[in-house]
């Protein structure tokens, strides 16, 4: 391995890693992300009526021929509302993969000079298999019970996986209290504060980070109805390691919903997934070089490589460890069916 952990200056700009996720998310029609505020139809129904409700969203995008890609998204939210208490369970996922470029493979048994190439050999077309590029799964459950009109307690837990961010598995449990600051036909706003416990496993182990830790969990939930059918929603959940304050993360979602019917809504949303101390990543160190001959005599032994900005040949120099980007962004469009 060449070099040690890179500084913040060595990290790639956040937008570079955000773009692939955004391109994939733009393909999704009817995908729901965990942590996003619920669509307008179900939100209003869930807060004003008791009983069970369910929202299910699925999406599938397939391409063939000159390009091969598979994108699958799903989401499901189950709620039960009783007098003075609320139960909510959410699951969601995005999985996307693309195949590499096609190529012609020369038939076996053909012989040709090391410095040359075979003349008109037999070939066959190879279509590489589809490899997973984006894998993001989340699940959570939360139970709330009112203590008064403006005060409640809650408890719950969750699991998530984000392969691009280097998170293989992260489990979180929490319990705490919250306040309802506004609750009317136009605006609903509440905040919550809880103690949490996190157990996580990253793709590349980081000895400088705790895999298990006690934390503080803070959050809010905001909904604003602008008209009879348009609703803006925002949710934030932040989790801080109490033994290392710099080790924190947050999940924020913005969503705008419009009712299309009694059981149908159109929703667009933007999700920010932030890790202040992201997982480490081993990357290749590559130099682009040209040969420099100081004495101008080929083969004299004094030839050197000189790195260049463009062109030249690529030379692998080993690996180095950097950190993943702190911010992932996901843009979603969803057609939501609720019952």
Image: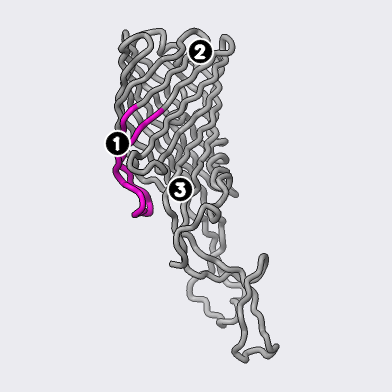
Residue 1 drawn above or below residue 263: below
Between disc 2 and disc 3, whose residue precedes? 3
Q: Which residue is mark 2?
A: 187
Part of the protein shown in magenta: 194-218
Q: Few, some or many C-alpha atoms within 10 Å of disc 3 (few <14, some 14-19, many ≥20)?
A: some
Quadrant location, the N terminus: bottom left
Label 3: state its secondary structure: strand
The Cα–Cα distance between marks 3 and 1, rounded to whole angstroms, is 31 Å
Label 1: state its secondary structure: strand
Label 2: state its secondary structure: strand
Residue drawn at (53%, 15%) of the image: 224
For residue 112, which quarter of the picture?
bottom right
- Magenta region includes residue 207: yes
Q: Nearer the viewer, mark 3 or mark 1?
A: 1
Q: Count the labels in the image.
A: 3
Image location (x, y in percent) of residue 238: 42, 33
* Residue with the most extreme right position: 296
Quadrant location, the C terminus: top left
């Amino acid at each position: 391995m060449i070099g040690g952990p890179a500084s913040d200056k060595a990290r790639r700009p956040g937008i570079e890693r955000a773009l692939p996720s955004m391109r994939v998310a733009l393909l999704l029609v009817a995908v729901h992300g965990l942590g996003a505020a619920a669509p307008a139809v179900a939100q209003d129904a869930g807060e004003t009526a008791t009983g069970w409700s369910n929202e299910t969203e699925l999406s599938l995008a397939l391409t063939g021929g000159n390009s091969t890609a598979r994108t699958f998204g799903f989401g499901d939210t189950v709620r039960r509302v009783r007098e003075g208490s609320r139960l909510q369970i959410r699951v969601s996922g995005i999985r996307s993969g693309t195949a590499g470029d096609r190529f012609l493979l020369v038939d076996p048994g053909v012989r040709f000079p090391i410095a040359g190439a075979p003349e008109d050999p037999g070939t066959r077309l190879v279509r590489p298999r589809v490899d997973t590029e984006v894998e993001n799964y989340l699940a959570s459950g939360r139970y709330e019970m009112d203590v008064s009109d403006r005060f409640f307690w809650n408890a719950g837990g969750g699991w998530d996986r984000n392969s691009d961010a280097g998170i293989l598995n992260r489990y979180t449990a929490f319990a705490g209290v919250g306040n309802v600051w506004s609750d009317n036909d136009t605006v609903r706003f509440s905040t919550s504060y809880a103690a949490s416990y996190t157990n996580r496993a990253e793709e590349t182990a980081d000895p400088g980070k705790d895999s298990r830790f006690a934390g503080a969990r803070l959050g809010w939930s905001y909904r604003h109805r602008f008209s009879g059918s348009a609703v803006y929603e925002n949710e934030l959940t932040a989790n801080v390691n109490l033994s290392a304050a710099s080790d924190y993360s947050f999940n924020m979602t913005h969503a705008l919903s419009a009712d299309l019917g009694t059981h149908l809504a159109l929703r667009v949303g933007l999700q920010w997934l932030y890790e202040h101390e992201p997982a480490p990543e081993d990357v290749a160190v590559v130099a682009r070089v040209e040969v420099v001959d100081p004495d101008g005599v080929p083969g004299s032994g004094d030839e050197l490589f000189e790195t260049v900005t463009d062109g030249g040949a690529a030379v692998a120099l080993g690996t180095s460890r950097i950190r993943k980007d702190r911010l992932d962004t996901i843009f979603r469009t969803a057609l939501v069916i609720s019952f």
